[in-house]
Amino acid sequence: MFDSITGSIRNAVNKIRHQDDVAALTKATAELKKALLKADVHHKTTKELIASIELQTKNSGIGQDSFLRALKSELTNLLTTSGNQGFVFSSTPPTTILMTGLQGSGKTTTTGKLANYLKIRKKKVLVAACDLQRLAAVEQLKQIAAQIEVDIYFDDNEKDPIKLALAAKEKAIKEHYDVLLIDTAGRLAIDEELMLQLKNVKDAINPSEIFYVADALTGHDATKTATTFKEKIGIDGVILSKYDGDTKGGVALSIANQVEVPLRFIGTGEKMPDLEVFIPDRIVSRLLGLGDIEGLAERTSAIIDEKKAKEVSKKIKKGEFNFNDFLDQLSMMSKLGSMKSIIGMIPGLSQVAGPLKDMDFENSSEIKRIKALIGSMTLKERENPDLMNSSRKKRISVGSGLSEVQINKILKQFKNASKMAKQLSSKGGMKGLQNMLS
Ligand code: GDP
C-alpha cells in the first residue's frame, strides 16, 4: 500500500550515515521533500513537515536515530487531527451515520464495508438505501446487505430521501439497532441541489456523525471536495476509498491536515473486509516499513472463532481434518480481506512479498477446483474422504466437471497435507494448518 513512499523514505534515512553531518541532513531532507511531493502530499504540508523534522533532528543531535525519531513524531502529529478516531458509538443508540460523497467515490461500497466491520464486532446494524440519484445504488446496497447478512431499509415507492431516512431511523429506534448507516445521494460534481438535499436530510435526521467518502485516486481533488462538503454541510470524518489503487499514497498524509477533519478509515480493496481504521501511529509505523502487528492482531481476533480454532487444532492432531473443516478455514480467510492489505501489516514482508501481494487466494484455480469437488460431495464424503471409491468418483466427476484424474490428484494432495499437518502440529501447533493451506 505504501510501497513507493516507504522506499523513498528509507532512501532519505540512508543519506545520514555519520553523526553531526549537517550536509547529510540537508541531503536527507531534500530527498524526503522530493518523495513527499511526488507522492502528492500537499506542498504546504510538505514544507511545514520538513522544517519541523530538520529542527527536531538538529536539536537532538544529527544522526540516523534522531532523524527517524523526528520523522516518526512529526508524521504522527501531521496525521493526528482533533476529533474522533475510527468508529465512535453515541451514548443513545442508534448511532446514526450519514454517508456522503460524490458519485463513484465508493460511498455505497463503503457503507457496506462499515456495516460489515460493525457486524463482525457483534453490533446490530441497519443500512438505509437513500441514494435515489444513482440508478443502481439501491439495488447495489441490497446485494451487499444480503452478502454480508446485514438488515437493510428501502422503499421502492418512496421518492423523497428525507421521508426514507426518517422511516429508516424510526425502524432503527423501534427495533433497537445499535447503528444506522444512511447511504445518501451523490453527484458527479458538487452542485447546489445536492448540497441542499444533504442539508435537508441532515436537519431531519440529526445524525450522530457525517462521514465523507473521498476517492484516493482523485489525488488533491479529494481534499478540495472534502473541504467543500465540510463548509457546506459539515463533516465529522473522512473515509479515503480506493487507497489500494493510489500508487502515490500521499493524499492520506495530507487530507486530515488540510481539511482539518480526522481521517477515520481507509478502503484498501473492493472486498467487504477491506476497510481499515486509520490510527496515525500505526500508519506511520507502516509508512516507515515497520509493519502494524497490533492492527493485524485486532483484525484477526475480531474474526477468528477461538472455539472453532481449538476444535480444528484438535482434529489436525488426530489426523481427522476433513473437507468441511477446509471450507470453514477458507471462509475465515476470506473474511480477513485481500492479501495486499494484510501484507503491509507484517514488518518487512511488503518488501519481500513480491507476487504474493496480488494473489487472490480464494479465486485461484486450485481453490476453485477444490471447491467444485467439495460442492459435489455428500456430507458423509466430506467428513470422511476415505469413502471415495470409483463409483463415487464417477458421480462427482459429472457433478463437478472435474476429470477423475483431477479428482484423484486433489484427494491425494488433501491426504498428504492432512498427514503432514498432523506431524507438524505435534511439533508446532497451528503451523501445521498454515502449511496445509499454503
Ligand atoms: P458510489 O457511487 O459512491 O456509491 O460508488 P460505489 O460504491 O458504487 O463504488 C464505485 C466503484 O469503486 C465500485 O466499482 C467499487 O467496487 C469501487 N471501490 C469502492 N471502494 C473501493 C476500494 O477501497 N478499493 C477499490 N479497489 N475499489 C473500490
Image (cartoon, rainbow, N blue to C red):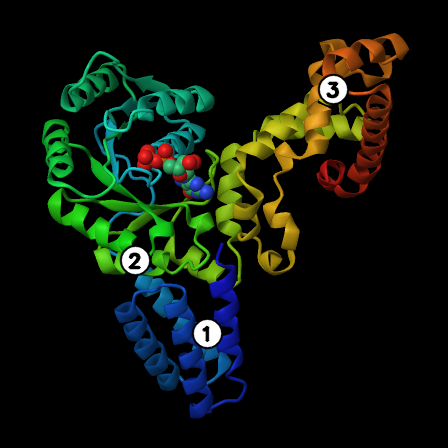
What is the crowding at mark 2: few (fewer than 14 residues within 10 Å), some, or many (at least 20)? some
Q: Amino acid at mark 2?
A: His
Label 2 secondary element: helix
Q: Is residue 287 left or right of residue 347?
A: left
Residue 352 in picture, x, y percent from top left: 65, 59
The residue carrying mark 2 is 220
Of residue 201 and residue 262, the one placed in the foreground of this image is: 201
Q: Earlier in the sequence, mark 2 or mark 3?
A: 2
State which quadrant residue 29 falls in.
bottom left
Label 1 secondary element: helix
Of residue 98 and residue 134, the one placed in the foreground of this image is: 134
The residue carrying mark 3 is 373
Q: Nearer the viewer, mark 2 or mark 3?
A: 2
Q: Can residue 80 be seen in this snapshot?
A: no
Q: Amino acid at mark 3?
A: Leu
Query: Where does ligand 1 appear, by image quarter?
Result: top left
The residue carrying mark 1 is 68
Distance (Cα) linking label 2 and label 1: 27 Å
Q: Is residue 52 left or right of residue 158?
A: right
- Residue plotted at (71% across, 40% down): 434
Is the Cβ of the residue at disc 2 closer than 8 Å to that at disc 1? no
Residue 216 in picture, x, y percent from top left: 36, 50
State which quadrant residue 67 falls in.
bottom left
What is the crowding at mark 1: few (fewer than 14 residues within 10 Å), some, or many (at least 20)? some
